[in-house]
Amino acid sequence: MNWIALAVFVLLFGFVTILGFAASHWRRGDLDLLHEWGLAGRRFGTLVTWFLLGGDLYTAYTFIAVPALVFGAGAIGFFAVPYTIIVYPIVFVVFPRLWSVCRHHGYITAADFVRGRFDSSWLALAIAVTGLFATMPYIALQLVGLQVVIGAMGLPATGLAGDLPLVIAFVILAAFTYTSGLRAPASIAIVKDILIYVTIIVAVVVIPINLGGFGKIFAAVPPAKLLLAPPTADNLGAYSAFATLALGSALALFLYPHSITGVLSSNSRHVIRRNAAFLPAYSFVLGLIALLGFMAIAAGVDKAPEFADYFKRYGSNFTVPALILNQFPAWFAGFAFAAIGIGALVPAAIMSIATANLFTRNIYKEYVNRDCTPKQEAQMAKIVSLIVKVGALAFIIFLPLQYAIQLQLLGGIWMSQTLPAVLIGLYTRWLHRWALLLGWASGISLGTWMAATAGKTAFSTSVFPLAIGGLTVPGYAALYALVLNIAVSVVFTVLFDLVGVGRGRDSTAPADYHV
Amino acid sequence: MAGQSSGKRRTAWLWYLPLVLPFIATLWVPFYSSLEPQWNGIPFFYWYQFLWIFISAALTLFVYFTTNGKN
């Protein structure tokens, strides 16, 4: 039982708890209005948005899973770096348009925008439901990140005592999200990001010194893991997997409800543009975090007897905690674990707020209670965010971890299928609303089928070996599904226009995308 | 925007072209999937990707300044 680490952890956790509750007074607004609770009144400037999006996008699960992948599979795990390199030019060009049109029309979610743009409640529902199903497993996985660091401090892992710390953390999270809305994770993100930067910079300086330099670290990695396996005559292998994982993930990242919530909470389109240039600082940190996987190999943590039980319990997810415990004194381990643990709270809070916004606007208000008052709307969102978190907690406690991982894998594939309606829709209304719905359905079906059949067991991998002629091109299922999605949307747009199927009315005007 | 000539509008998108470079640089894997040349013990595959984090950020900042009036 690592008392020193636990003490530091609890201290830092206590601090952010107070911060979370105090946040309701920050940049004061009427938290009985949905856009105040759910979007912090669209008040955040460049710096706060930088902390918020950084805290939102670089999650506890990222810090656990990326090094685990690099540790286990090697170079392919590094796809996270080009992924986060190319995502920002996309954000820079496309998302100011979304911000402007949403601000102008009071849209809170992507589905709100689709509803207004294409005048189709079915299409909007498809977008909303996709967002809901893709985000919920992601919340569950943040709790997993928390679970691993709690276990790493020596707290019991089984029975009621094992679940208790997680439940306590969850209750704290639920309480300050309920009272303060998006302001809570925004304020905590500042602390989280500072903790993460300090932890990683220290780690990347100290650990190579301990291990004898980067040369020695890379020399300890088996050659098969060090580089991507080059393509053969009939199989593009790791190269196409790597590139398609990067591209597909980049296209999907900002379609996720929690990314859109982060973007829409900023106070100007220029905040988004500036952040597209400054957020890559987090990509740098992510690259360093990925290198921790190799440092773990060089440090031999998988062979250390004191970690054997932990690796059995958590699998390769224990890579980063093991490395931290192996290389640092107990107090710094507590600091680092707090960084990761708090790093779970921030995205979990934002994700639950984003799903609450989606459900409230695009299901409750659209189909259940059209004439709800703003206060009822905000109240519903607060309750939904609570339910969503309880659901995620129950999922992690009662179901095998594998389910959450598989659902999140599918979630990424599903989220990509909203690209035509949301991103292409920001530029042109040429695609027909019913064609988009058919395209979405095709993409979801194909993507799910590919994930089910690609690996040795169903949903074990999202890389599908597509056979074109005699060549096998392993690629991210999300991207292949998106190609089908767009193709179907285009073909049926032509068909529906020919037959004269109604297109509905566009509530937006071209100027709305530039204000 | 009022007063902006249509000619300027039509070529405004050219200013965004530098943003295509990170895509080409990082998605064309065969170009950088090698160990040599190393830098400080770090294989090319890895330091190349870190380098492009900085280059892309710089390009984005550049495009931000050059397109700031051209909304």
Image (cartoon, coloured by chain):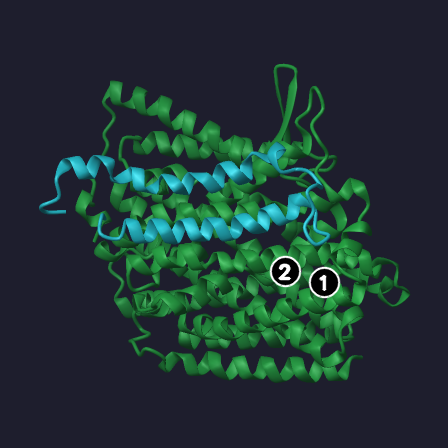
Chain colours: A green, B cyan
- In this image, A480 relative to A228: left or right? left
- In this image, A263 relative to A414: left or right? left
Tell me if residue A263 comes above or below residue A11 in the rendering.
Answer: above
The residue where tag 2 is placed is A63
**How far across and down, in percent of the image, does residue A502 sit?**
23, 29
- Res. A133 visible in picture: no
Q: Are marks 1 and 2 in contact (CB under 8 Å)?
A: yes
Q: Which mark is residue A200?
A: none
- Mark 1 vs 2, N-terminal side: 2
Q: Nearer the viewer, residue A116 or A512?
A: A512
Chain under numbered label 1: A
Q: Secondary structure at mark 2?
A: helix
Amino acid of disc 1: Val
Q: Classify residue A68 by image quadrant.
A: bottom right
The residue where tag 1 is placed is A320
Amino acid of disc 2: Phe
Report crowding for label 2: few under 14, some 14 to 19, many 20 or more residues within 10 A (C-alpha): many
Tell me if residue A6 comes above or below residue A52 in the rendering.
Answer: below
